[in-house]
Image: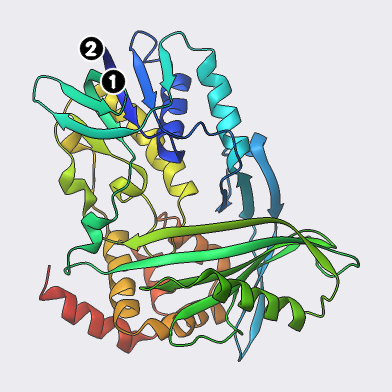
Amino acid sequence: MKHYDYIFTGSGLAALMTVNEMIVSGKFKDKSILLIDENSKKTNDRTWCFWDNTNAYDNIVSANWDFAWFKNIAFERKLELIPYQYKMVRGIDFYNFVLCLISNQNNIQLVQQKVIRIEDLGNRCIVNTEIENYTCDQIINSIFNPEIAINQSKYPFLHQHFIGWKIKCNKAIFNPACATFMDFTIEQKGNTRFMYVLPFSENEALIEYTLFSKELLLQEEYETEIKKYITKAGITDFEIIEKEQGNIPMTCYPFWKHNSKNILNVGSAGGWTKASTGYTFKNTVNKSKVLAQFISEENDLRKFHKLNKFWFYDLLLLDILDNKNELGSTIFSAMFKNGDSSLIFKFLDEETSFWEDLQVIWKCPKGLFIRALINRLYTL
């Protein structure tokens, strides 16, 4: 069996960002690295959106917006995002960018195989695929097994699930300078449901039907709601250019408890997805930088995870939505109605001080969060 210093099982966002940071750091030129994934990463299988006030991955950002609408049945507000921009990165552009960089590294290899087992043997790790076996000093694993979080009751598990249509109209309909971040004017049907619109030009946009809920829908249910929304917007003549579908875990389950001295779970498998919103890209940008620095200095991967106050904030929100899923519109509307939008995005990026936290949290329905806090204190 061939031996490596590091093996990445799975080569999605978290793995590729971490490898990118390792390359940029220049600290791993003498380390052998293997990435294993059953997917070749040659298709545009997803898009990532994130708010940002840095230049992170600006070379592959395909669209950005300075303003965004928040809407519900009682009010609508145009959010000025400055100093942030809302940005979009296409999956294929990200894959091509990082894989091109990797192709120029003599110490990094990629294989397209399905991983079936990983194990920390103490003095080394072993990775079994359907084709062959490998050994290494340490494994960075991003293959997500949702059953770990679903088959327990201490921490809520919700899905952020969606279907989106990228459409092209025969006339000018959209304002390409302003996205629609959350539109809660649609029927909630006992859940947290909203439309999400990213306009790329006056006649082209991505329209997405999104839910935070325990149960998934049949495909036709998502698409029926998209059709209703398009009709309500006065769009009668259009073509569907692309479709996308996704399901992002929303949970505060402590995935880090499954880390070992030589195996670290990252990405969704490591709880890197922002539990309260499902946003992944910006969290992964930050964590991949910290991880590359960490493994250049530390051998015990169990020491990587650091619990912070935002984990607990997210847990309280998920506790509420787990018990009363229809309250999502109420909570987000209270936050955005009069709140400072740039401060809210800073809060969601986990960059606020405790005083700034209170300014955001105080906008939310206080009774709901106080009851959630009391209930949660008995179960931690």
Position above or below: 130 against 159: above
Count all numbered tags in the image, as a single digit: 2
Residue 38: give x, y in percent of width and height: 42, 33
Residue at (36, 28) in percent of width and height = 292
Residue corresponding to mark 1: 132
Q: Would residue 116 appear left or right of 227 to someone viewing this image?
A: left
* Element type at mark 1: loop
In the rendered image, residue 368, in percent from the top left (x then y), is placed at: 32, 86
Residue of label 2:
1
Give the quadrant of the N terminus: top left
Nearer-the-camera pick, 211 or 216: 216
Horizontal arrangement in the rendering, residue 251 relative to residue 160 (left or right)? left
Relative side of 299 to 68, left or right: left
The type of residue carrying mark 2 is Met
Residue at x 38% of width, y 73% of height: 215
Classify mark 1: residues with Cα within 10 Å, few (<14), some (14-19) or many (20+).
few
Residue occupying image coordinates x 51% and y 78%: 193
> Disc 1 residue type?
Glu
Q: Could you tell me which residue is drawn at 54 percent across and 25 percent down?
A: 99
Disc 2 to disc 1: CB gap under 8 Å: yes
Seen as rendered, the residue at the extreme front is: 131
Numbered disc 2: secondary structure: loop
